[in-house]
Image (tube, rainbow, N blue to C red):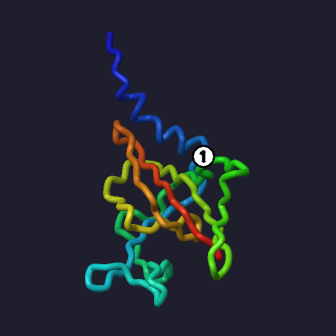
Amino acid sequence: MNQSLTYELNQVMPLAEATGLLSSLCTIQQRPLTSGQPKVSAAGQVDLNPPEFTDVAGLVNIPCQLVVMAVPRPDQSGIARMPTGFDDKNARHLLLNDYYPQILDSYQAVVDGTPYQIQTVEHDSQKQQTRLAIRTYTK
């Protein structure tokens, strides 16, 4: 009796895509570098200006599912009080439709036109899918 799960594992992402769960599109972009370092603003912040980013070949318009990272508790505020105002942290998980080992956490993910910083890149042990922890800040 053959009890291999190989066939079933290969069907996970195509079945997820067929259900319509992966309703967003993601493009992975690379930061412009100056002397091997990311471009920074006068305040020393990494510049997140999307027009200056370039698309990474083979990582454009990837079907994906964007979800909230966790339901916040009242004692876990998503707002940081800064001297110049308030920053609203927006953390999410992003499930991509396939296995993408070439994605680095120094890249940026643009999902449905919104740029996100990639915090972590995670792959499953069977090399079937890639998940990203991403965030954006709104001032």
Name the one closer to the observer, 68 or 9: 68
Within the image, what quadrant is residue 34 found in? bottom left
Q: How many marks?
A: 1
On screen, residue 96 versus residue 39, left or right, reads right
Q: Residues within 10 Å of mark 1 (few under 14, many from 20)?
A: some
Residue 56 screen position, x and y as percent:
37, 69
Q: Position of residue 93 (x, y in %)?
A: 54, 52
Quarter placement of the N terminus = top left
Which residue is farthest right? 74
Specify the amino acid type for callout 1. Leu
In percent of the image, x 46 and y 54: which residue is there? 132
Residue corresponding to mark 1: 21
* Outermost front residue: 83
Give me the residue at 66% from left, 71% from top.
81
Disc 1 secondary structure class: loop
**Residue 63 drawn above or below residue 3:** below
- Quadrant location of the C terminus in the rendered image: bottom right
Residue placed at 47% from the left, 58% from the top?
62
Q: Give x and y (percent) for residue 129.
A: 42, 45
Q: Residue at x 46, y 49 (%)?
A: 131
Query: Where 79 sits versus 5, above or below?
Result: below
Q: Position of residue 12 (x, y in %)?
A: 47, 36
Q: Nearer the viewer, residue 55 or 38?
A: 38
109 w.r.t. 131: above or below: below
Residue that extends furthest to the bottom in the rendered view of this protein: 42
Name, please, the residue furthest toward the top. 1
In depth, the one of 62 and 122 nearer the eye is 122
| Rendering quarter of residue 102 | bottom left
